[in-house]
Image (spheres, rainbow, N blue to C red):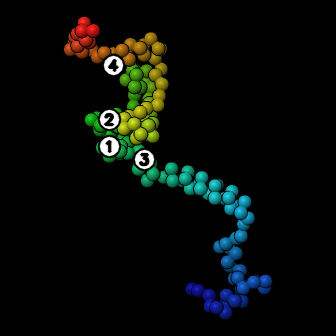
Amino acid sequence: MFASNAECSAKTSSSSNIPSFAATFAQQISPEEFDRQKVVYTKQAVAELQNSEEFKRWLQKCSCCSSSWYDGQFSTQCQECGGFAMSRPCGICLGHCGATWYRDIDMSHKMKEGHWNGKCYLPESEQRHFILQHLVGNDEDTLVDALTDLGNT
């Protein structure tokens, strides 16, 4: 229930006509304090937004095929998805080292291609072996094509 005008005027301070309950809603602060608070509150608001489930769902979504990486969805045919959602086995040795790589969301969106952050735990000599396998391929046709290209140069 609302207070009547008579009740409100009875609760006003003696120095002004502002009701005493108004002090709980607005407090005058200095311009310097305002500048400090707007930065602090803005940082808090941004942090809360970035930690919200709605924002994560929006951000962790493929901009090409609309798969929700947040929900573990991805497309094997989509370049931006890169065949995985938010994590994948090591991109060098395909998981032989036991490392898990995590999606770089910003780079994946910007480059329209899956980008990952991680480190292979195998020695560099073994890593080179896997890298060469990826570059050359294991099938006979790939090797024949590579040798033919070398012969034509």
Badge 4 density bin: few <14, some 14–19, many ≥20, Cα 10 Å:
few
What is the residue that sits farthest to the front in this orientation?
Answer: 153
If you read the primary sequence from the N terminus, does the residue marked by circle 1 or circle 4 appear first?
1
User: Residue flagged by tag 3: what amino acid is it?
Assistant: Leu
Residues under labels 1 and 4: Cα distance? 25 Å
Pointer 2 local density, CA inside 10 Å: few below 14, some 14–19, many at least 20: some
Position of residue 48 measured from the top left corner of the image (x, y, whole percent): 54, 53
Sequence order check, earlier mark of 1 and 2:
1
Badge 1 crowding class, 10 Å Cα cut-off, few under 14, some 14 to 19, many 20 or more, is few
At label 2, the amino acid type is Gln
In the rendered view, tell whether residue 127 sits above or below residue 4.
Answer: above
Q: Nearer the viewer, residue 29 or 25?
A: 29
**Eyeballing the image, is 34 above or below 62?**
below
| Label 2 sits on residue | 79
Circles 1 and 2: CB atoms closer than 8 Å: yes
Badge 3 is on which residue? Answer: 59
Q: Can you tell which quarter of the image residue 85 is in?
A: top left
Q: Is residue 131 above or below residue 78?
A: above
Sequence order check, earlier mark of 3 and 4: 3
Residue 151 locus on image (x, y percent)? 25, 6
Between disc 1 and disc 3, the foreground one is 1
